[in-house]
Amino acid sequence: MNCTSKKYLALMNKVLDHEATKQEEQVLDQHLALCEECRMHFNQLKYSTNLLNQLAHPQLPVGFTKSVLEQLPLEKRHAIREWGSRHPMLTAVAICAVPTLVMIGARHQNRSKNDYVLINASSDQS
Amino acid sequence: MDQKEKRLIRKVKKGDQQAFAELVDRYKNSVFAISLRMVGNTQEAEDLSQETFIRAFNHIDQYDHDRKFSTWLFRIATNISIDFLRRRKANVSLDAVVPGTEGLALSTIIPDGGELPDEMMMRKETEEMVQLEIRKLPEKYRSAVILKYIEDLSLKEISEVMDIPVGTVKTRIHRGREMLRKSITAGGGMRE
Ligand SMILES: [Zn+2]
């Protein structure tokens, strides 16, 4: 910029940042009316920032939130960890109880398998 | 920050993923806009947005309730984009990077308004030109300009997101704005 002072460039920035006083705005306006170089500079700055403001805001695909959730650590694991840090004794008891529950579950499954076999056998008979 | 958001964050801190889903819905498009304008490609921007939210969830304990949640989130988003750009710069020579908005489909940048095809094409060309010039900005100017003109944040908010003084934010925006002015109007064709 060849204009004798950088003062006006600083004023332009103040105006664009919405930080200029009424008086500063007037000072700039008066200069712009006289100085073609600064007038063009200011118009170009406004033109460029208007283009930035007008840039589109594209939308994400519909499934975005769901796919974020799918990548999070498992909720239960997180919840148990949180809970466990507050109740270490209970967690220990809970962990000891797990094999028992698994065994009961397995026995239950075996029984229902037997039931299934029995039903099959009886249907073969008829 | 509103009370509902505070409640949601408290739930997220206890591991509630449904509460987190609500936060994602609130901020996903802002985060996407930041990532998109930082890297210039929709597919990459979508991946980076996902990464932003996953990192936010995993580090939610570090979020301080006295600050705005959006500020904290946008900080993660800009950092992730900058990390990505550095990795890409390290891996690929600059000449090999295709300039512009290669991933931007026309349908995503044209708002509904029954525009004529000519106007649509012109708008698309302008968008691509502006995006290309944004990408030429050094990263620290680019993020400041994006937060100001795409996200419409105040200088104070930008200083919180970037963790730099307001004076530095101003300098970066002034320099970024000046670089954009030069490059955008370089052809002499200012379209009105
Ligand atoms: Zn002048």
Image (cartoon, rainbow, N blue to C red):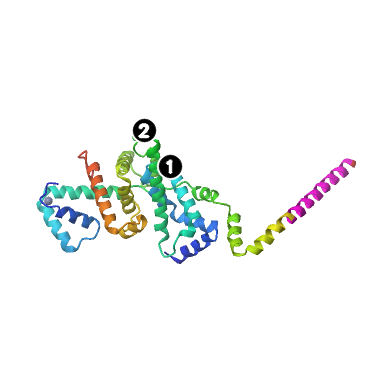
Is A115 contained in the magenta span?
Answer: yes
Say which mark, if any, is on residue B96: 2
Q: Amino acid at mark 2?
A: Ala
Q: Quadrant of the C terminus of chain B?
A: top left
Outermost residue to the bottom: B3
Helix, strand or loop at label 1? It is: helix
- Report x, y in % for residue A104: 77, 54
Residue drawn at x 21%, y 61% is A20
Q: Amino acid at mark 1?
A: Glu
Q: Given the image, what chain letter belongs to the residue carrying mark 2?
A: B
Are the residues flagged by discs 2 and 1 from a single subunit?
yes
Q: Is mark 1 within 8 Å of ligand 1?
A: no
Say which mark, if any, is on residue B5: none
Q: Is residue B47 above or below residue B58?
A: above
Is residue B145 found left or right of A2 in the rendered image? right
Q: What is the crowding at mark 1: few (fewer than 14 residues within 10 Å), some, or many (at least 20)?
A: some
Q: Is residue A47 above or below residue A30?
A: above
Is A121 contained in the magenta span?
Answer: yes
Q: Main secondary structure of the magenta part?
A: helix
Q: Quadrant of the N terminus of chain B?
A: bottom left
Helix, strand or loop at label 2? It is: helix
Q: Given the image, what chain letter belongs to the residue carrying mark 1?
A: B
Of badges 2 and 1, the one in the foreground is: 2
Residue A108 seen anywhere in this rendered image of the structure:
yes
Report the residue marked by disc 1: B44
Residue drawn at x 24%, y 51% is B174
- Report x, y in % for residue B108: 40, 44
Part of the protein shown in magenta: A100-124
- Report x, y in % for residue B54: 49, 51
